[in-house]
Image (spheres, rainbow, N blue to C red):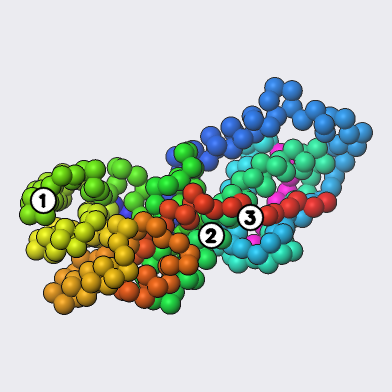
Amino acid sequence: MIDLNTLSLPELFRYFTADGRLNTLLTLARDEDLGEAGDITTDLLERGDEPAAASFVAREAGVVCGLAALPTLLDVFNANIDLDLQSNDGAAVEPGTPLATLHGPVRELVGIERTMLNFVGRLSGVASQTRRYVEAASVGRSVICDTRKTTPGWRHLEKYATRCGGATLHRLGLHDAVLLKDNHLAGLAPHEFADRVRAMAESARQRFDMRFFEVEVDTLDQFEALLALPDELIDYILLDNMSNDDMQRAVERRDALGRRVQLEASGGITLERVGEISRIGVDRISVGALTHAARSLDLGLDR
């Protein structure tokens, strides 16, 4: 299975949009705005067909994402607009930074305006939120990972945005990696827990082409039980909602035994905590807030 984290941003965008869902989302957005009657406000303009230029700009600092989708947006809207990109996805921008210049009839420029601002603003908000976490974690050794806490239908795009912000992609869904969580293994004693995990890991490696095999633990007893299993069975152990002290003990224990399994912190991760967690020495920190708590970046289209 391809390692998505090795792809460049243009390659990743093509991979995530090859199935046509970008066209589907933009078609839905177009139909929400235009309905059956079209843009009745613009139809009132006396000079709606006159050529004009508009500048797409950032109105606040952040990381831009979604510019790669603009050619598809223009195609879906059947807009007779010339697009001159002046920035790239993943670029850090300041207030006033030009992102693109658009040339075309007034009615077509204003017809795409809101969808373009909504779309690029949302993805840029995710990328900007991600960059804040990545920078905070840079004081230690951890990489920041995204989660499945994404907007339904937007998962691939929002995960692309987290990559634009500097994150490492986690699993895409339930189909491409195994992540055994508490609800999968509820009620098992530590020794039963390890035996069940061993059996499932062996089965998974025989049956599936998967990105990784990961197990969530809530206690250090569960963690110790997993350390008794062979290294090749488990790729990651997720330390769920553990205190900093318990995560430190887990890292020290893993290192003292010379085990290769990587450790992931998750649950209750805030921007204020992420630096100290990274210093503990976990390998990954997964953060749902990259997507579910991101605010759209303020962008504008100015004539």
Is 218 placed left or right of 108 in the picture?
Answer: left
How far apart marks 2 and 3 lie (CA) works out to 10 Å
> Residue 207 in the image: x percent, y percent?
16, 44
One can see residue 230 in this view:
no
Is 223 placed left or right of 136 in the picture?
Answer: left
Q: Badge 3 is on which residue?
A: 297
Q: Badge 2 is on which residue?
A: 129
Tag 2: amino acid: Gln
How far apart marks 1 and 2 lie (CA) works out to 39 Å
> Residue 24 in the image: x percent, y percent?
53, 34
State the extent of the magenta-drawn residues as a range: 79-88
In the image, residue 87 lies in the stretch drawn in magenta: yes
Tag 3: amino acid: Leu
Circle 1 SS class: loop
Circle 2 SS class: helix
Q: Badge 1 is on which residue?
A: 189
Q: Residues within 10 Å of mark 2 (few under 14, many from 20)?
A: many
In this rendered view, identify the residue nearer to me: 210 or 280.
280
Point out the frontmost of discs 1 and 2.
Answer: 1
- Indicate whether 280 appears above or below 121: below
Which residue corresponds to the image point at 74% horizontal and 38% vertical from the top-left? 111
Q: Residues within 10 Å of mark 1 (few under 14, many from 20)?
A: few
Which residue corresponds to the image point at 64% horizontal and 33% vertical from the top-left? 30
- Indicate whether 140 appears above or below 22: below
